[in-house]
Image (cartoon, rainbow, N blue to C red):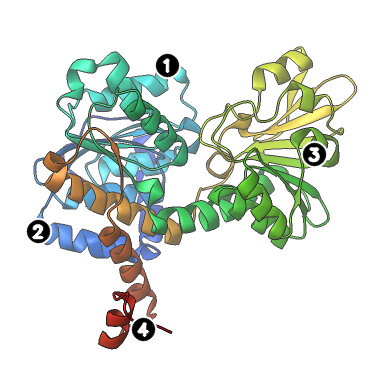
Amino acid sequence: MPVTQLPAHDVADLALAAEGRRRIEWAEREMPVLRLIRQRFERERPLAGIRIAACLHVTTETANLMRTLAAGGAEVALAASNPLSTKDDVAAALVTDYGISTFARHGADRDGYYAHLNAVADTHPAITMDDGCDLVTLLHTERPAQVGEVVAGTEETTTGVIRLRAMAADGALGYPVVAVNEARTKHLFDNRYGTGQSAVDGILRATNILLAGRHVVVAGYGWVGRGIASRFRGMGAQVAVTEVDPIPAIEALMDGFVVMSMAEAAPWGEVFITATGDLNVIREEHFRLMRDGAILANAGHFDAEIQLPALRRLADGRVREVRHDVDEYDLGDRRIRLVVEGRLVNLGAAEGHPAAVMDMSFANQALGVEYVVAHHGELGRQVYAVPDAIDREVARLKLDALGVGIDELTPEQRAYLSSWKSGT
């Protein structure tokens, strides 16, 4: 039932809540692990009285994570980590049906984005949940007096973990953070299968191109790049990978992909998708080499992987929207098409990861928060991996929900694996 007194919020239209609730409930059907955790949280209330500020993509899957934290007794405030991924109906339902304080509007400008971040920071949280480290950065740079109020945090994505480790190395990180992104049940599945499928989905929704036979260039061969490359190949595309690290480059080659530099790939490719977490991966010198009609998209967290200022300068104002979510830049002798402003293509042009994959990622988030609430006093101001016991519990719950059984080691096998005395 809708809540009788609405929490603080800034959303586009509360009248959208009914549709949002339907979609949240649909996603819940695909999230059995999170549902089991929520049922336990309702009984045990391990987060009672804990204020949590979250900066995450406001999607149906995130809504179910917020419901789980609230069921555990937490006071939750949510802001969007990317305005283009915000689903306005979901934001409305979180406020009216679930009583979650939500600050998110699809398409909010930079000022609106930071106003929403500051709104959740105004709740004076004890726990932060981030997707990209923007909330953590805001607290440390603009609200340093509040950092001491935070006992711990969690981080969802690769880019955020990179930033947090840099903060920790500089001695700037003010509290411990659990890198949910590093959980095997997150990066092996969410990053690979989730982004792999949803990135293809986003490009197809935006462009409606035929992928079979198309030359596709994937920049980066981490877990996200692996998933994207394999899914494009599965759709019949000819896939090339660019890398700066020789080890994943060899892996991509042995996985059957063409490996080349971006300078070599620029005139060869027809579709380019970045997945590195770095900036200016595709630059002005590459734009000048691309064929007419090249399509650019980004699956990294920030819109910095494609050098957009250079692209705008080359177009000199000759930019037009040719399809919803596709802008065409006229460089004079060629046209380059940019999908969803170079922002996350799987969330900006599609609906993000399937709920079945986010089930494991957000289970790690929920259990990670429970862990830091109980153990923050034992942790230093560093970035920590998700405890192996939590990772394995998430996998076990997922298998149970799917009705899949696995073997157990016999006592003899356990003894063999733990002994150095057994010979051949």
Q: Which residue is mark 3?
A: 265
As drawn, the label of residue 407 is 4
Q: Can residue 17 be seen?
A: yes
Q: Secondary structure at mark 2?
A: helix
Q: Position of residue 417 (x, y in %)?
A: 33, 76
Q: CB under 8 Å between callouts 3 and 1? A: no
Note whether 400 is above or below 120 in the view shown: below
Q: Earlier in the sequence, mark 2 or mark 3?
A: 2
Q: Quadrant of residue 154?
A: top left
Residues under numbered marks 2 and 1 in contact, where contact means CB atoms less than 8 Å apart: no
Number of the label disc, if any, that sits on residue 111: 1
Tell me the tag on residue 44.
2
User: Circle 4: is it few (<14), some (14-19), or many (20+) Cα within 10 Å?
Assistant: few
Q: Amino acid at mark 4?
A: Asp
Out of 412 and 58, give the one closest to the viewer: 412
Locate residue 76, reporting x and y percent. Answer: 21, 39
Which of discs 2 and 4 lies nearer the camera? The answer is 4
Nearer-the-camera pick, 358 or 22 = 358
How would you rate the neighbour count of disc 1 (Cα within 10 Å): few for under 14, some for 14-19, many for 20 or more?
Answer: few
Closer to us: 146 or 212: 146
Which is in the foreground here, disc 3 or disc 1?
A: 3
Q: Amino acid at mark 1?
A: Asp
Q: Are marks 4 and 1 in contact (CB under 8 Å)?
A: no
Q: Residue at x 40, y 20 (%)?
A: 112
Q: Nearer the viewer, mark 4 or mark 1?
A: 4
Question: Element type at marker 4?
Answer: loop
